[in-house]
Image (cartoon, grey):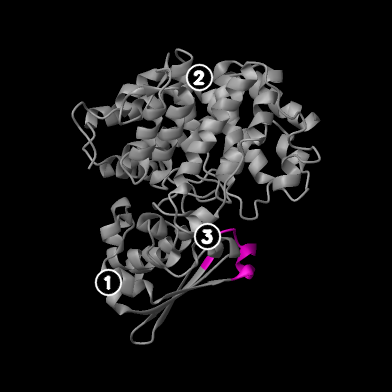
Amino acid sequence: METEKRLAEYVADTGFQELPGHALEVIKNVVLTNLGTTIGGADAEGCREAVDLAREWGGSKESTLHVHGGKVPAHNAAFANSIMARALDFDDVMNPGIHVGASSVPTALAMAERVGGCSGKDFLAALVLGTEVAARINAASAYDGFDPVGICTVFATAAVAGRILGLNARQMLDALALALNRAGGSFQSNIDGALAVRFIQGFASQGGIISAQLAQRGITGPQNFLEGMHGYFHLYAKDKQDTELVAGELGKRFELSNTVFKKYPSSGSTMASTQAVLELVREKGIGPDDVAEVRVRVTRQAFRMGGHPFVIGDNPTVNAQFNIRYCVANAFHRKCSKLQHFEPLSIKEPQIMDLARRVHTQPDAALESRGLLAMDMEVVIRDGTVFRKSVDIPAGFPGNPLSRDEHMARFWDCVGYAQRPWPGADVDKIISLVEGLEGLDDVRSLIPLLLRAPGQTGH
């Protein structure tokens, strides 16, 4: 259990001063991103139900339900708040689809309230270390249809919660070990367009907090939770035990640097094709009526997630978010990609549906040598001219980072999407506090800024 022990000691014993500036900068962007998606997503489908259920469960008034208000036990607040943070699918992500921040940030805020306060430095340290543990385990995984959020994000939330609770290394080992037994989730939810996609985010937060609280009370988990006969490597890595990737160069190599901040509010599988269309529109002036056919070749991973024909099911928003054909049609038709384009009425516009039928997707394994989400596109216009566009690394992915202005644009897009206007002064204050997190005496000062004004309700 040497690998497991090293990870636990790293999370429990590393000081804020040992964390490099680039890792802290990534996490600040994660925090800002998820505060924005929480404000913008709080009234998305399923979120009100999650909040109502958390209230119905009752219990100690420990942590705040963001936007909607009221207090419930920390693990249930994090459950509902994480669903809100994920609902827009505009939060941070890492290949091959693990969303960490939409769970880690709500978990950290809920636990900060649970323990009676947390400094900005301690908050950042918990998030860096928890994210790094999950990122390393994720990098060694072979999910084969399991949802990385449900399988691996729970290690981040257990580490974050355990760090804020002040667990020692032995307790942290138990927290991470117990988290293995909370892992679960399937990508079938994404393919079928089920609201379960965003609820898995809540399960990961809830399970991580419970694991840390149990460990604090002396409940033990399987000490060989990674390397054991029926441990993580066997279950979710096809028996490949890459212990160096998971526990090598701790404090020197940061897998969290692979965090993606998507430029557009849809699945990562749609990023390259959306970007390609918008570049062609800008460069060639192609309009939706000009398009006779669009041929999109993508990697096998992207095709599995978003290459299927566009069909509107019970949850149109999820159907559109995870569909390349819709996103291509939307980008041609509207010449941009914004959150409001993934509302049911926008999705069902006849012109969009007609254009989506002219988009064809195909998997191409040869693209994978250029990048995990590399894409080639051919656009045939009605006079027979063919325009081609290739994207190897979409904007916002490692190797092609967003600028600060682009991060701010994403944040403001989320805030502007809220069902009720958010006070500009509060938004400015959120930005200021996040940028100066290491100087905050208590991160609970963020909580009032995440609450809707009295008397305001969502549609």
Earlier-in-chain disc, 3 versus 2: 2
Residue named by callout 2: 121
Name the residue type under label 3.
Met
**Image location (x, y in percent) of residue 252:** 67, 32
Task: Report helix, strand or loop for mark 3.
Answer: helix
Q: Which residues are magenta?
A: 364-375
Residue highlighted by disc 1: 351
The answer to whether the residue labelled 3 contacts the one labelled 1, judged by CB atoms less than 8 Å apart, is no
Badge 1 crowding class, 10 Å Cα cut-off, few under 14, some 14 to 19, many 20 or more, is some
Q: Closest to the observer: 440 or 95?
A: 95
- Residue 374 highlighted magenta (yes or no): yes
Instruction: Please determine whether, in this image, residue 91 is positioned above or below residue 96.
Output: above
Q: Crowding at label 2, few (<14), some or many (≥20) Cα neighbours within 10 Å?
A: many
User: At 42% across and 48% down in the image, what residue appears?
Assistant: 89
Secondary structure of the residue carrying tag 2 is: helix
Give the labeled residue for mark 3: 305
Q: Image quadrant for the N terminus?
A: top right
Look at discs 1 and 2 and give the one toward the viewer. 1
SS at badge 1: helix
Q: Tell me: 345 left or right of 259.
A: left
**Could you tell which of marks 1 and 2 lies nearer the N-terminus?**
2
Query: Gap between marks 1 and 2, in whole Å?
Result: 50 Å
Answer whether labels 3 and 2 touch (C-beta < 8 Å): no
Q: Residue at x 33, y 24 (%)?
A: 70
Residue 35 placement (x, y as % from top left):
38, 34
Q: Quadrant of residue 18?
A: top right
Left or right of 28 in this view: 219:
right
Image height of 60 relative to 382, above or below: above
Q: Earlier in the sequence, mark 3 or mark 1?
A: 3
